[in-house]
Amino acid sequence: MTDDTLKLYVPAGNWLVETLTDYCMANGIGNAEVGGIGSIGSVWTLVNPNGTPVVIESNDEASYEMTSLVGNVTLRQGRALFDRSQLNTGRYPQFDTAVKTYNCYAHVHVAFADSSMIVHGSLCRPGIEKGAIPANCMFSEMVSVPPFGSFCNWDPRFWFPPPNQGHNVGC
């Protein structure tokens, strides 16, 4: 086991997750932590509102500033395929399940800013109705996890300032 830190430059026009996956496959990397910053062009983000995957394209500007990229590389049975014609279906990447071996799978989350310094990365915005809140937004709701019981999924014990100072804790 090594504690190597590797730096990877993704040239303009290349797809980040595809390039990362290909790099890991070519170099035998099956377990890694991923982080990054930099300038990016067209951004396609996969969100999963209400259990329905949707890919959203952000290409209003020539360049965005990637303020955060975090993720991991792990092994998953099958082979990741990057068919761009499937982007709008929310099925991206696809997996060739006929491949029975375990192969690299990159899972990353990104936040990026436009030239007005507005940060994008999720569909969270004020005024969303509770039933329409995308799965990647934070909200407070009781969650039942048998056999452990119920708990608040956004636990107010970790809020600052504490909820007893006028916050509506929600659960």
Image (tube, rainbow, N blue to C red):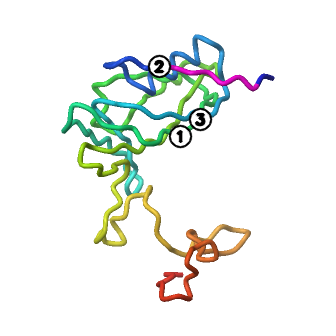
Q: Residues within 10 Å of mark 2 (few under 14, many from 20)?
A: few
- Total residue callouts: 3
In depth, the one of 122 and 162 nearer the eye is 162
Q: Nearer the viewer, mark 2 or mark 3?
A: 2
Query: On the image, numbered disc 2 is attached to which residue?
Result: 9
* Residue type, mark 1 in image: Val
The x and y percentages for residue 19 are 46, 19
The amino acid on which the numbered mark 2 sits, given as a three-letter code, is Tyr
Residue 12: percent from the left, percent from the top?
A: 33, 19
Q: In the rendering, which numbered label is found on residue 72?
A: 3
Q: Earlier in the sequence, mark 2 or mark 3?
A: 2
Farthest-out residue, top: 26
Vertical placement of residue 40 versus 148, above or below: above
Query: Which residue has dot 1 on it?
Result: 70
Mark 1 is surrounded, within 10 Å at the Cα level, by few (under 14), some (14 to 19) or many (20 or more) other residues, namely some
- Asked if disc 3 and disc 1 are in contact, CB closer than 8 Å, the reply is no
Q: Does residue 23 show up magenta in the picture?
A: no
Boundaries of the magenta span: 3-8
Gap between marks 2 and 1, in whole Å?
15 Å
Element type at mark 1: strand
> Is 7 in the magenta?
yes
Seen at 35% across and 69% down, the residue is 131
Q: Quadrant of the C terminus?
A: bottom right
The amino acid type found where label 3 is placed reads Asn
Say whether residue 108 is left or right of residue 130: right
Q: Residue 96: percent from the left, percent from the top?
A: 49, 22
